Amino acid sequence: MADNAKPKVGFYSFSGCEGDLLTIIHCEDELLDIFAAVDVRSFRLASSDVHNDEPLDIAFVEGSITTNHHAALIKGIRERSALVVALGACASFGGPQSARLGYDDWEKRFKKIYGDAKLTVARAFESQPIDEFIKVDCYIPGCPIDKHQFFFALTRLIKGMPVEFPSFPVCAECKWNENECLLLKGELCLGPVTAGGCNSRCPNYNLPCVGCWGPTKEANVASEINLLKERNFSETDIVNKLRLFGGAAMVRRFADLLGIEPQGPLKKVRSKKEDKHKPIVTAEVKKVAVPKGTKTKPKTKVNAKTGKKR
Amino acid sequence: MKALKLKKGDMYTYLESLKSYGELWGPVSRGDKYVYGKLDNVRDVALEALRTIIPPKKFFVPPRFNMFRYSDNKFTETFEDIKPRVLFGLHPCDIHGIMILDELFLDRFPDPYYKKRREATAIIGLSCTPDDKCMARSTNTHAVEGGFDLAFNELDEDYLVWVGSSLGDDLVRLNIDLFSEDINTGDLQKYLAWRRKRNARYKLNFDLTGMPDIMELSWDSSLWQELADRCLACGSCSMVCPTCNCYNVRDVSDLSLSSGVRERYWDSCMNMEYALVAGGHNFREARAERLKLWYTHKLKAFITEYGKPSCIGCGRCIDTCPVNINVAEVIRSLQGQEVKV
């Protein structure tokens, strides 16, 4: 009975490695708290007891959309969910499988791999992020996501508060961790144009940033490309690296810099002006219904304001 | 201020003695760079280190820490990681950086988080030999007359040791047999010669007289936009600057939803949301405006208020910015000198 008082949530996955849901199920120290905070109605990694026809307060969706079957499912999830959260790089930007978004050569590539195979289960198409099909309320980027960002977003959404992720790039956290700058050491690092929040996960292990958190709101991709060219990286290598995880975010915002005239999906690239400062988190957060008198509702309103001092 | 002498060969023994005061921290190597690290083994200390990736401000304002823990209607401040510490090997410019932070965090509105960490920390300076990125002579921060408990100055086979506070005197007494008071005019000559040699090594020499005037006259300069086109707005300059001290706070709820922490972390005026206020207005949305603010603060506003620039000439921005935007280049440009980009 108590479960009825808690927000109902579902976890879903489409095309991807399921690494984001795996990150959540691996939260062994916090798993009981997660299940105490919300009523999990669908999470196939956790339980085969799934209820996929109920209204949800929050749907967490990982993976990209690659078939008409997926497209129908994601639309169904949207219809019965108050909030939809894109979980990870694939749901948010399309993931590595969307690295060629914007080039009209999907059928050629399909043929190269599968020959003349006929698909009978569903009709496949170029991999795309979920927001090409539905409205997304909040994005939790990363490959895989960072569990602390997931907890942060989960608690904020339950409380009906905005989900504000850091606007600084990977470089900031990389400095906090006192890493040697890989860019200055001659590596193709995307730290300066990639959203932080990962605690500079890769540079901490001496690996350059691949951009899996997607571009920052203000990413100066033109300067990053110039900088890498000066360091003798080829244009192809630079563009491929930017698009590997940047997917739709790169194509929508920086098609001109990447030398792409978007074809096929994403043909209707949003005007630059409109997308200029499009926040990663666009949550028009609706208050999730939490019945009165339950423990999940904070008695005093927690001050959500973030102050800034100089 | 009293002067003593310590034989170079006794340095490690003395460093070991300092551990009876508290944790010993000093420069250690990390790849081709240096960081301030905990000296569990005193022989790990990198006496040759010139500049660390981030400055010693991390000891007094950690990059990210929890200010307090809250639950329904109360909060408890947390001072988790504060213990007596000795910071060894700070060069004069970094000590000047700490003195600037002291003015900002201890004077008018004392910051308890800074104060508690600062009071638990002893500071031991160490002389250095500048490289081509050092410009402390231009900012007059190449020598220290205060702001330290002890300061070591290399002098042939010895260190000249300046005692700068009563705590410094106590630190000497942790192993007083290692120190000699036998200082003669020969030492003075050696010290003066060492100073001449060090001063001659500065490659970056600027006359910063009247910098606020020059900044004011450059308000509409096209320089800011030119720099902004290149600037990645990554904020690295602020993170490595010994005097950048802006921070942001946010509340992070526990999964229980009824308790949580208020987190405080380094911010940068290069961050796009720096001047974003409630209602969505951003006072400095343009990158050029934010860059101008950064340099106005270092070379104009701070001088007007405190009589000195808030750049201490450590060269970290020169060493760090991937697109070569730094204090030296901005000063050169503003003063009408040729700039190599």
Image (cartoon, rainbow, N blue to C red):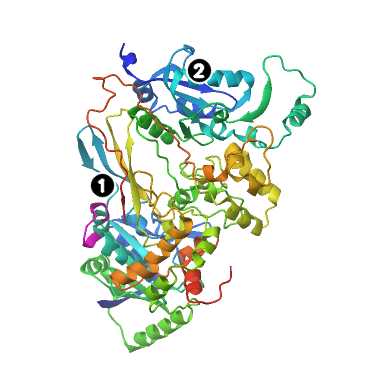
Task: Say which amino acid is labelled 2.
Answer: Arg
Tell me: residue B76, above or below residue B130.
above
Q: Which is more toward the observer, B159 or B133?
A: B133
Q: Position of residue B82 (x, y in %)?
A: 27, 50
In the rendered structure, find residue A44 and report the number of the disc placed on it: 2
CA–CA distance in space, label 1 to label 2: 42 Å
* Residue B157 occupies quadrant: bottom left
- Write down the residue under mark 1: B79
Disc 1 secondary structure class: loop
Please tell me how crowded label 1 is: few (under 14), some (14-19), or many (20+) other residues with Cα within 10 Å: some
Residue situated furthest right in the rendering: A116
Q: Position of residue B92 (x, y in %)?
A: 37, 71
Q: Quick check: B141 above or below B120?
A: below
Residue B91 in view: no
Chain identity of mark 2: A
Question: What residue is rendered at 59% in x and 20% in y?
Answer: A70
Dot 1 amino acid type? Phe
The residue closer to the viewer here, A140 or A173, is: A140
